Image (spheres, grey):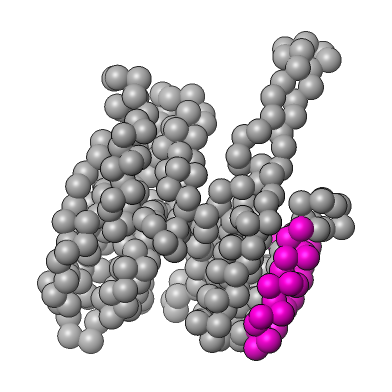
Amino acid sequence: MYKIAVIPGDGIGPEVTSEALKVLKAAAEIYGFNYELKHYDFGGDRYLATGEILPDSVLTELAQFDAIYLGAIGHDKVPQGVLERGILLKVRFGLDQYINLRPIKLYPGVWTPLKDKGPEHIDFIVVRENTEGLYIGIGGNMKKGTPDEVAIQEMICTRKGVERCVRYAYDLTGKRNKNNKLTLVSKANVLTYGHELWYRTFNEVGEEYKNITKDYAYVDACCMWMVKNPEWFDVIVTDNMFGDIITDLGAMIQGGMGIAASGNINPNGVSMFEPIHGSAPKYKGLNVINPLAAIGAAQMMLNHLGETKASGRIEQAIICALNCGKIKDLSARSGMGTDEIGDLVAGFVKKPQA
């Protein structure tokens, strides 16, 4: 019996979450695993009504679950950053979800803006450090609001934080067993201290992984190669900020935000899974948003929980849905309702050999 916490969140979050849970139920019926859901209403509406974001007591409660499923966070009536820091970052930091895992995979039949590239060229994973770097929020302002204002934002890298991320990436590369190549993306030529630690740790830990090919790319060159030669990449490991940037580029080359899912991983604790497309409040309640990224997040969650057959069946169902000719676009102009796409994928899950 898996205990899963569900935070539908804001905007389109509840709609896409509903479809992801529909597909989860279909997979459970096929493969016979049991789960229990507990819903939490944290997000913009609750904050506006009560001033409450995410209490420490609930964070402690979340640590007792097997997984967390998140729809989307971001409300057009709440100042930017309040919910993101108060919910997303609080969960990631508080539950030590130190890996952000982002598969960049182009499915057959999905359009990519890259000329002459197909699914055989775009299939890699980004391992992003998720609890350090610039996102810690250490810094401040002096003489705020004056012409002499100074703003300081510090980047924090620890040997422990870097090493456990790098080691996770090496292990994943070996398990993936595709090209057995791990690329460190950094800017060690300019960010002298923090990224020199990344470079040194990457090499030292790499001595334990003789079967893995080590590769290096500065982040600006990585962006160029992701567009020109995405087939060069197998697994990428990088810091928090650069990972945030290159994974959005990755989403575009795999077909757009409508297909991109992610996991916030604590290998020894509870992990959280979510689509990366945000809350898109202007589409709230219109039943037009494509829920495939949210369904993909549920697929990642099942894989993480060890339900690999169910996870694989959902992925195959997504591919079938994309190739059946009914979904015209991965955006809000798909030609189908959010619930209709969920029904479509759930139907393929239930079909023999979906």
- From the viewer's side, name the closer residue of 336 and 246: 246
Percent across and percent down for residue 131 are: 56, 48
Judging depth in this view, the residue of 139 and 6 nearest the camera is 139
In the rendered view, tell whether residue 18 sits above or below residue 222: above
- Which residue is depicted at the point 45% across and 58% down? 266
Q: Residue at x 29, y 19 (%)?
A: 50
Residue 290: percent from left, percent from top: 34, 56
Of residue 191 and residue 318, the one placed in the foreground of this image is 191
Q: Quadrant of the C terminus?
A: bottom left
Depth order, front residue of 316/129: 129
> Looking at the picture, how far across and down is residue 69, in whole percent?
32, 53
Left or right of 334? Residue 22 is left
Q: Can you tell which quarter of the image residue 227 is in?
A: bottom right
In this rendering, position of residue 255 left or right of residue 343: right
**Point 68% across, 72% down: residue:** 205
Which quarter of the rendering shows the N terminus? bottom left
In percent of the image, x 82 and y 51: which residue is there? 193
Q: Give the range drawn in magenta.
A: 197-223
285 lies left or right of 150: left
The reply, left or right, for residue 90 in relation to residue 343 is right
Q: Look at the image and say whether residue 82 sits in the magenta stretch.
A: no
User: Measured along the vertical axis of the image, is residue 335 above or below residue 90?
Assistant: below
Rendering coords of residue 96 (x, y %): 48, 50
